[in-house]
Image: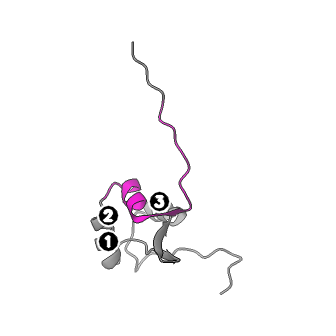
Amino acid sequence: MITSRPPTIEPLPVLLTKKQTAFHISMTDRTVDGMVAEGKFPPFVVVGSSRRWRSAELIAWCDAGCPDMAEWEWPLAEDSPP
């Protein structure tokens, strides 16, 4: 009898590359690019010369039903300066 172990669930990194982002939402890199351009996907943040997506924002966006960016506002941390 072959038995398998349950999959290991590792926590997401705080910031995701486009490839990681696409993988976790089951879409292609090009689909992510197109949705960002159309205002239908959370924008990336620039870290140095790299683009990254906030994993917490993506989770919250999905939980909200994946609304267009005109309807979506990622909350700032309470201790962030205005």
The residue sitting at the bottom extreme is 82
Q: Residues within 10 Å of mark 1 (few under 14, many from 20)?
A: some
Q: Which mark is residue 33?
A: 1
Measured Cα–Cα span from mark 1 to mark 3? 21 Å
Q: Are marks 1 and 2 in contact (CB under 8 Å)?
A: yes
Residue 34's x, y, as percent?
28, 72
Q: Which residue is mark 2?
A: 29
Residue 20 sits in which quadrant?
bottom left
Q: Residues within 10 Å of mark 3 (few under 14, many from 20)?
A: few
User: Going from the N terminus, do you reach mark 1 or mark 3 first?
Assistant: 1
User: Eyeballing the image, is 69 above or below 8?
Assistant: below
The residue segment tinted magenta is: 6-27
Q: Are there few (<14), some (14-19), or many (20+) residues within 10 Å of tag 2?
A: some
Q: Residue furthest top?
A: 1
Q: Identify the residue under disc 3.
A: 63
Amino acid type indicated by mark 3: Asp
Residue at x 38% of width, y 71% of height: 41
Residue type pointed to by label 2: Asp
Q: Position of residue 57 (x, y in %)?
A: 51, 66
- Residue for point 65% across, 87% down: 82
The outermost residue toward the front is 49
